[in-house]
Amino acid sequence: MKIRQNVRHWAAKKALTAPVIGKRVEDRLVDLHTSIFLDKADAVHREARRAHLDDFFEATMDTYVAALDSGYTEAKAREITHVQANFDFYNHGWTEMMEFPGDELADHYDRYADFFERWGITIDDPLGDFRPDDGISDAPSTPEKLDDPEHPHAEGGFADDVYVETDDGEVVVGGQDEPEDVDPADAPGVDSDEAGAD
């Protein structure tokens, strides 16, 4: 998959694993992801999907941290959560929200099969063991879109590795090295006073 990586991603990684500010960053990241993907949805479906996406993305924050703890790079840990989301979009027939074509689902699963199998994640069950005990909100599906899928926001041909686009527009296979001077205050939802708190 092709994703972006900049200082805000590194700061979010640092902040998500920190006390005090971690929850605030998580909440902001959930809001951002929900907004980004709802903008890709047909306007008539957006509000009906909002609660589901909020719950889903909140669960994937735990996936992200677990992937980091398992030794995956920031780019790969984040890509894992995007793959989960695309499984969910496909299962609901939300093809207009997908980041890669449906015929690449198995390729993306196979790349992270060890992690996915460890946590019970499948294409049919994108959250696996990360599904909250009280579940997540339902949302109406559009299965008819799977018959003739349109993927206006999908980029195919990136299923063999994680491809990272830098702020300079360069595409780096596998991602970038983490900067030494990452400031968690640069993460979404954090101000400098909170970042300095213990």
Image: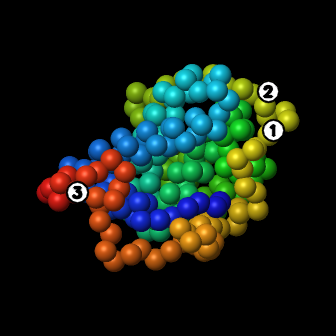
One can see residue 72 in this view: no
What amino acid is labelled 2 in the image? Glu
Answer with mark 2 or mark 3, whichever residue precedes in sequence: 2
Q: Quadrant of the N terminus?
A: bottom right
Q: Compared with residue 174, is residue 189 higher up or lower down, i.e. above or below?
A: above
Judging depth in this view, the residue of 122 and 41 nearest the camera is 41
Asked if residue 8 lies left or right of residue 98, the reply is left
Count the marks: how many?
3
Residue 193 got which mark?
none
- Circle 2 residues within 10 Å: few <14, some 14–19, many ≥20: few
| Residue that mark 2 sits on | 144
The CA span between labels 3 and 1 is 45 Å
What amino acid is labelled 3 in the image? Ser
Q: Residue at x 43, y 60 (%)?
A: 9
Q: Compared with residue 195, is residue 180 higher up or lower down, i.e. above or below?
A: below
Q: Residue at x 78, y 31 (%)?
A: 145
Answer with mark 2 or mark 1, whichever residue precedes in sequence: 2
Contact check, label 3 and label 1, Cβ < 8 Å: no
Judging depth in this view, the residue of 165 and 90 nearest the camera is 165
| Residue that mark 1 sits on | 149
Answer with mark 3 or mark 1, whichever residue precedes in sequence: 1
| Residue that mark 3 sits on | 192
The CA span between labels 2 and 1 is 9 Å
- Circle 3 residues within 10 Å: few <14, some 14–19, many ≥20: few
Asked if residue 74 lies left or right of residue 156, the reply is left
Q: Which secondary structure lies at badge 2?
A: helix
